[in-house]
Amino acid sequence: MGKSRKSFISLYVKMFFFALIIFFGHSQIIYAQPVLPNIQIGIGPTENPQQAASGIQILALITVLSLAPSILMMTTAFIRVVVVLSFTRNAMALQQSPPNQVLIGLALFITFFVMAPTWSQVNSEALTPFLAGEITPEEAFDRASTPVKEFMYRQTRPRDLRLFMKHGGVERPNNLDEIPLHTIIPAFIISELKTAFMMGFMLYIPFLVIDMIVASTLMSMGMLMLPPVMISMPFKILLFTMVDGWHLVVSSVLAGFR
């Protein structure tokens, strides 16, 4: 487990290119030898089908490159982590501290940590055999999707999964392999959002108590013109620091993944 986590960043990069290979592996065009693309800016008629196919593939490549990060984020632990961290910052009434770059970076590395066993399984069962030429792109895609499905299924509520299966006309599956990706992915996303909002609500409660105490104290002293948020913010930061808040938040997030 330790070795897989240490090498996970390199695996993540390999998985990104693996997605591109799988995408273009479904193409029926077979090249006899490697050919460098001839890129020309312009629109005009062509009599060579090979040139037209190359242009379509370049357009598809640009589309995949723009959508691949979002797809990878939506099928991992990133959703829950980034929403909980955002709730934590808002609960303390801090607008830009920590900044967005820090929150996103922390969420990404926590996601790497959580997804390391899953992507290690994908690497050993799908990516490595595919790069060695032992399996076809279709087999590699099926093997790669199975561990990701298992991870998403463990976090998905049955109610959300039944919702998309009902509206998608999917019959009751006998096993996990029969659940299509276009059904389990949206169910996983809304389940993660619900879990993240529940954790965010629990984070707000202690800070809300501080706001109420400060507001009632200022009112009893007749200081109605002084904003309570200005007084309560230092106490929120002090409380969060004394209880080692970031450790508690991250440990709760990690413990929530099954």
Image (cartoon, grey):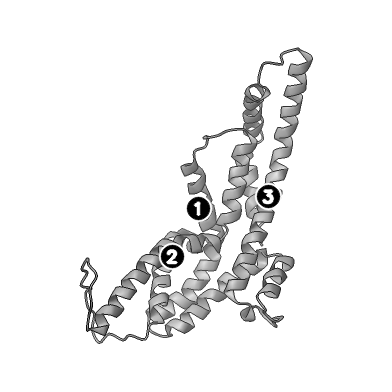
User: Mark 2 or mark 1, which has the lower sequence index?
Assistant: 2
Tell me the kind of residue under disc 1. Answer: Leu
Q: What whole-number distance in Å separates the C-alpha atoms at marks 3 and 1?
A: 19 Å
User: Mark 3 or mark 2, which has the lower sequence index?
Assistant: 2
Q: What whole-number distance in Å separates the C-alpha atoms at marks 2 and 1?
A: 14 Å
* x, y percent for residue 101: 46, 43
| Residue ID for mark 2 | 11
Give the residue at x 61% y 65%. Answer: 186
**Where, quadrant-wise, is the C terminus in this rendering?**
bottom right
Residue 229 shown left or right of residue 45 in the figure: right
State whether residue 249 is above or below residue 110: above
Tell me the kind of residue under disc 2. Answer: Leu
Tell me the kind of residue under disc 3. Answer: Phe
Residue lying at the far front in this picture: please name it.
45
- Which is more toward the observer, 13 or 69? 69
- Which is more toward the observer, 8 or 105? 105
* x, y percent for residue 106: 51, 47
| Residue ID for mark 1 | 108
Residue 151 appears in view: no
**Do callouts 3 and 1 mark residues in contact (Cβ within 8 Å)?**
no
| Residue ID for mark 3 | 197
Q: How many marks?
A: 3
**Where, quadrant-wise, is the N terminus in this rendering?**
bottom right
